[in-house]
Image (tube, rainbow, N blue to C red):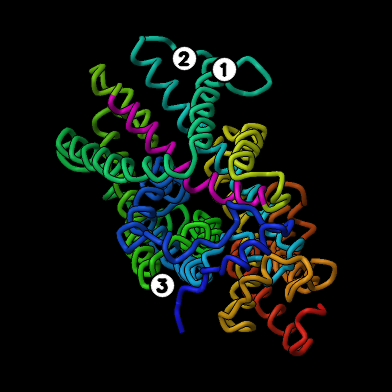
Amino acid sequence: MNPIQSDLSPAQLAELKSSPLFNADLSPVSSAERKWRVGSFAALWISMSACIPTYMLASSLIGGGMNWWQAVLTIFLGNLIVLAPMILNAHAGTRYGIPFPVYCRAAFGPLGANVPAVLRALVACGWFGIQTWIGGDAIYKICCTLFNIQPATATNWLGINAGQFACFMLFWAVNMYVIYRGIDTIRLLLNIKAPLLIALGLLLLWWAWSKAGGFGPMLSQPSAFDVGQPKEGQFWKYFFPALTGMVGFWATLSLNIPDFSRYAKSQRDQILGQALGLPATMALYSFIGVAVTSATTIIFKETLWNPVDVLTRFNNPAVLVTSLVALCIATLATNIAANVVSPANDFAHLAPHKISFRLGGYMTGVLGVLMMPWKLLANPESYIFDWLGGYSALLGPIAGVLIADYFVIRRMKLDLVALYKSDGEYRYTNGFSLLAIAAIVLGALPSLPGFLVHVKRLNPENVPAMMVDLFNYSWFIGLAVAFVIYVAGRKLSGPKLIRS
């Protein structure tokens, strides 16, 4: 059997173009258009993983009590775990050339697919805002240093000053321009960015090592969970919610990876490329963050977790300008690839004949601003456990349903033409698979009490401790519960999948 099954005949293509579920951006990628090999996928993940949030990721874990190697190992393990659903969900994209929202139609129905697509899109909007804020903040801080301007304090209801907001909107406008230019500009940025930020990170690592005469006290700092330390015996209680947060970091892409794998030349290319590019890069770049931060304690007599804060300590204008350009390109490339491609397709899926990829990207940008991302980053604890952990409780069940439907129920066989028909094999109940939607709701439900306690909407004294603890495993529990419910429901309904 030919592993690539996305080539439609001219008659089939003509038929689908009249369907309300079809547009050019959502159409299957033909075998002739497949150009991504192992190196392309490895470069994609190196490009997206080498970013400022990854650099700062270990800081929250060390702040919670881990030592450096525990933090880096937790990050590596979390990305090794999320690699599994990443590769599994990528399979359908590679075999059939379809993007994520179309992939969802098989399990959720043509209209029901909007539920996982919009949930995924809203998370991406939050991430888009976070990355845009990071890029704008880099512009603001480096410009303050370059022109010797004292940063102003925030005096308005936004919680940031006018200069910060102006730089945020400037970087936002650059993102919007790239969306306007289209997918080829995104690919060019990724190709430039991968070596650029790796090189910048390694140069920063070399500078820190040489200036500090070693990486300083942080790499020799004991874990707060060791015997005789403040959190003795509490390691596992902290480790599992932290691991869930690390899985949640890329749980978004583990769903919409078909948006990229649809361009793969073969399954081998997407599997090897992702395995080589993701876990190791995340561990390496987070280690660079830990090591450089450790050295800043010696060099500057204070701990600087943000690489932008480190760079502002340089007085050489050439270094500052070069660093600013490099950070902006790197953040821009990660933002567009990780946080625009998917929601643009997801929003386009709501009304394929009216919303294009470009308009979907603009919608992502507007929602990203409205979410006020600087508030999401204000507290490291809430960033890891509320933001990453919270949306993991939603995305885990979606992954469970998709994997169960494609691999267990359908045995990797989809009717490509029927995926673009509102009255075809996947219509279910008026376009919705009630079972799939019930499975994601029931999958997320066990984590809800714990989430409400974490965001201080429920008093922990009114919730059983076991229910609060379930939130620490939200992604894992959600995936498992939704997987079992979906498979059981389909088996009970028999071969006539179209009816439920």
Position of residue 69 measured from the top left corner of the image (x, y, whole percent): 32, 57
Query: Can the viewer see residue 471 in this picture?
Result: yes
Most common secondary structure along the magenta stretch: helix
| Residue receiving disc 1 | 161
Estimate how packed mark 1 is, as few (under 14), some (14 to 19) or many (20 or more) residues with alpha carbons within 10 Å: some
| Residue receiving disc 3 | 267
Q: Which of 17 and 115 lies nearest the eye of the viewer?
A: 17
Amino acid type of the residue tagged 3 in the rendering = Gln
Mark 2 or 1 closer to N-term? 2
Q: Is residue 346 magenta?
A: yes
Query: Can the viewer see residue 237 in this picture?
Result: no
Residue plotted at (57% across, 17% down): 161
Amino acid type of the residue tagged 2 in the rendering = Pro
Q: Is residue 390 magenta?
A: no
The numbered mark at residue 151 is: 2
- For numbered disc 3, what is the local secondary structure? helix
Q: Is 427 rendered above or below residue 75?
A: below
Q: Is 337 rendered above or below residue 307?
A: below
Q: Would residue 8 appear left or right of 445 to someone viewing this image?
A: left
Tell me which segment is drawn in magenta: 322-348
